[in-house]
Image (cartoon, rainbow, N blue to C red):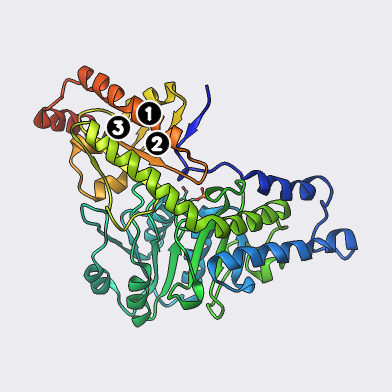
Amino acid sequence: MSIIYLDNNATTKVDPEVIEVMLPYLRDYYGNPSSMHTFGGQLGKAVKTARQQLAALLGADESEIVYTSCGTEGDNAAIRAALLAQPEKRHIITTQVEHPAVLNVCKQLETQGYSVTYLSVNSQGQLDLNELEASLTGNTALVTIMYANNETGTVFPIEQIGLRVKEHGALFHVDAVQAVGKIPLNMKNSTVDMLTLSGHKIHAPKGIGALYVRRGVRFRPLLIGGHQERGRRAGTENVPAIIALGKAAELEMLHLEEATKRERRLRDRLEQTLLATIPDCEVNGDPTQRLPNTTNIGFKYIEGEAILLSLNQYGICASSGSACTSGSLEPSHVLRAMGLPYTTLHGSIRFSLCRYTTDAEIDQVIAVMPSIVERLRALSPFKNDDAGWLQEQSLVVSQ
Ligand code: PLP
């Protein structure tokens, strides 16, 4: 059975061209770029080219790129750097819908004497900029907000946010792990001070990411050791992965316009057909300010995990907004922050496309989903019973 991979917000397939450019640096050119001999030292040139390729995707200067091991490291490094650079300030602003790579750092910082404001979102997952303005003070060291939400695809108005942040003299970090390669970026005309990205979301391998740090922003490294990355991230460079990320960035630039158009068309066709053929379902997230590749649909009265298992039998890979932890059902913090009713919260599924997604794959999902939902609803004791479902779910959650 072939795989229909619609879980590209979780991770992506490495582009074959990326594998090709990476291989010689695994097999033949294994030197250390910091070495004095030519065998190692020559790698510096290849790393420089890769850095230029990545900088071009962001509209940044190559000197503003700091390689990391993943998006999580980029988020951690940016938050720590902002606080270390301004030790007199003890307040951070973020949102309730961030990735755990930001949320859990903020939670830990609260135990270390920092105060954190978690901005709320409305039912479409959007922020209220008045709430942001009211939260900003002279004590605010950092505002850290995602560009696009990984679960719903909702895109935040980053530059409007940045203008307000700058008026109050705080640093502005953006987790753009889901936005890079899907939204054109230009750091030259931006209010963003630091921006996180991750290779494995843009058809590069896992184990490589980058943090953009605007020139002039005071930066303190998370990893301390050697002088790699101009003293901003110690550790021998992951040369094959850096080369791969450079190529992946070049390909993202090349494909961005045409791929996003195509993904939006396929996503809209999938979404509209499912909404038209399956009763009691709705799209979660902002209908217009949204990533072109993502749809998150809530199917009432059934469990997302059951839908995923059924899709899995057809080789279809998607994801649910909820995670099953220690026997009790814990719905997604993002969908909960949006105030979705329990009837929808538990049955939400995310389909995330990429440039490899085909019409035939979308046809297959459209073909199987109605019968999957119908079968699961027939087994559900809560079909058309919002009150009963609500009561049962509160019992499960409060256990
Ligand atoms: N931030 C967002 C918005 C993400 O979606 C992810 C990964 O899903 C991360 C951060 C973490 O990235 P990584 O898996 O590279 O650590």
Q: How far apart are labels 1 and 2 at the CA level?
A: 7 Å
User: What residue is at 88 percent from the left and 58 percent from the top?
Assistant: 39
Which secondary structure lies at badge 2?
strand
In the image, farthest residue toward the right: 37
Residue 399 shows up from this direction: no
Q: Is residue 392 above or below residue 334?
A: above
Residue 247: image tag: none
Q: How far apart are labels 2 and 3 at the CA level?
A: 15 Å
Coordinates of residue 56 in the picture (x, y in percent): 59, 68
Residue toward you, 348 or 270: 270
Residue 319: image tag: 2
Label 2 neighbourhood size at 10 Å, few (<14), some (14-19), many (20+)? many
Asked if the residues shown at circle 1 and circle 2 are in contact, with their CB atoms under 8 angstroms apart, the answer is yes
Q: Is residue 141 above or below residue 346?
A: below
User: What residue is at 21 percent from the left and 32 percent from the top?
Assistant: 300
Residue type, label 3: Leu
Residue type, label 1: Leu
Residue 308: image tag: 1
* Residue 325, picture quadrant: top left
